């Protein structure tokens, strides 16, 4: 798959897969100096990139597991979603869940992205839905083992 990508900042680094079998590619911080992310603080870190994603595809942006485990750094909204029609700069929305300051360094790998195919739904209003074994049972209804 070919994705057109535009560098919006001189210091932007193109996304890269770290291994041959990786589904996710890394986004880098396109900042000129370190930024301090204090506990419970939120920052939108620029990547300096915009993309042209084909119709029928989208980009999910996820936290890097190492940053989450070792430093408590995660995406503010859990997962970022970039739609095919968005052409603005991709920014990584980070938060610090730890009790210590975290320093985001220039060109640091701060998130990972995965391109995926999706389908648009057509909605059909119904008076009744098919029955299932689970039915309306919600949170915790399937047990923990």
Image (spheres, rainbow, N blue to C red):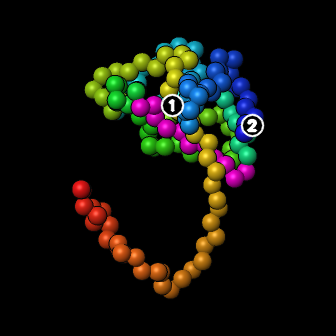
Crowdedness near tag 1: few (<14), some (14–19) or many (≥20) residues, C-alpha within 10 Å: many
Q: Quadrant of residue 10?
A: top right
Residue 39's x, y, as percent?
A: 33, 28
- Evaluate whether residue 105 shows in this view: yes
Task: Please say if 141 is above or below 127.
Answer: above
Task: Please say if 16 is above or below 82.
Answer: above
* Count of labels in the image: 2
Give the mark nearer the N terminus: 1 vs 2.
2
Q: Residue at x 62, y 42 (%)?
A: 115
Asked whether 65 or 126 is in front, the reply is 65
The N terminus - image quarter: top right
What residue does disc 1 label?
111
What residue does disc 2 label?
2
Q: Residue at x 40, y 27 (%)?
A: 66
Crowdedness near tag 2: few (<14), some (14–19) or many (≥20) residues, C-alpha within 10 Å: few
Magenta segment includes 59: yes
The residues colored magenta run 55-65
Q: Residue at x 55, y 24 (%)?
A: 18
Residue 68's x, y, as percent?
A: 38, 31
Q: Whole-Å distance between the Cαs marked 1 and 2?
A: 21 Å
Residue lying furthest front in this view?
21
């Amino acid at each position: 798959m070919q994705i057109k990508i535009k560098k919006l900042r001189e210091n932007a680094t193109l996304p890269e897969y770290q291994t041959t079998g990786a589904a996710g590619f890394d986004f880098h911080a396109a900042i000129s100096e370190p930024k301090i992310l204090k506990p419970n603080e939120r920052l939108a870190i620029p990547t300096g990139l915009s993309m042209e994603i084909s119709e029928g595809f989208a980009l999910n942006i996820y936290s890097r597991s190492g940053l989450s485990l070792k430093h408590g750094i995660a995406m503010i909204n859990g997962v970022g979603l970039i739609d095919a029609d968005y052409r603005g700069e991709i920014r990584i929305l980070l938060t610090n869940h730890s009790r210590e300051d975290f320093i985001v360094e220039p060109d640091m790998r701060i998130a990972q992205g995965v391109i995926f195919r999706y389908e648009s739904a057509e909605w059909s209003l119904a008076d009744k839905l098919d029955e299932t074994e689970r039915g309306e049972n919600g949170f915790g209804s399937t047990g923990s083992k």
